[in-house]
Image (cartoon, grey):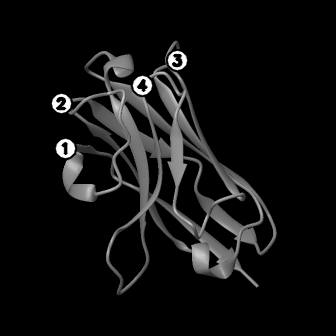
Amino acid sequence: QVQLVESGGGLVQAGGSLRLSCAASGRTFRNYAMGWFRQAPGKEREFVAAITWSGGNTYYADSVKDRFTISRDNAKNTMYLQMNGLKPEDTAVYYCAATKYDSSSLYLKSGDYDSWGQGTQVTVSL
């Protein structure tokens, strides 16, 4: 498994921006397709965005499309989530994840991922 550590969360006003980072170690980062998920209090973990090993293909949940951008830098073993136009409903703990499956595909289900970070809190105020 690859070890993942998220950072970059915090408190921001509605309409603001944050950039989350996910640093990987332990295995060859470029071998993994990756994803971001989030979980709000009292709700199930939900898919946010996914990216293939090369970064050439990405996919977003409808709720974040055109506001969030997923990217990765394989030379730095790091994945990012740029979040713009934040809304109070984006408040959640954000998790990055890696999958052992085909790294050229995109994965939207949490069950497809086998390595998870500890999460970083994002709070959006009015």
Please report contact status of discs 1 and 3: CB closer than 8 Å, yes or no.
Answer: no
Which element carries disc 3, helix, strand or loop? loop
18 left or right of 20 in image: right
Number of other residues with Cα within 10 Å of mark 1, as a class: few under 14, some 14 to 19, many 20 or more:
few
Residues at marks 3 and 2, CA–CA distance in whole angstroms? 18 Å
**In this rendering, the label closer to the viewer, 4 or 3:** 4
Q: Which residue is mark 1?
A: 114
Indicate the quadrant containing the N terminus: top left, top right, bottom left or bottom right.
top left
The spot of residue 55 in percent (x, y) is: 53, 28
Q: Which residue is mark 2?
A: 1
Q: Which residue is mark 4?
A: 53
**N-terminal label among 2 and 1:** 2
Q: Which residue is mark 3?
A: 76
Residues at marks 1 and 4, CA–CA distance in whole angstroms? 16 Å
Please report contact status of discs 3 and 2: CB closer than 8 Å, yes or no.
Answer: no
Residues at marks 4 and 3, CA–CA distance in whole angstroms? 13 Å
Which element carries disc 2, helix, strand or loop? loop
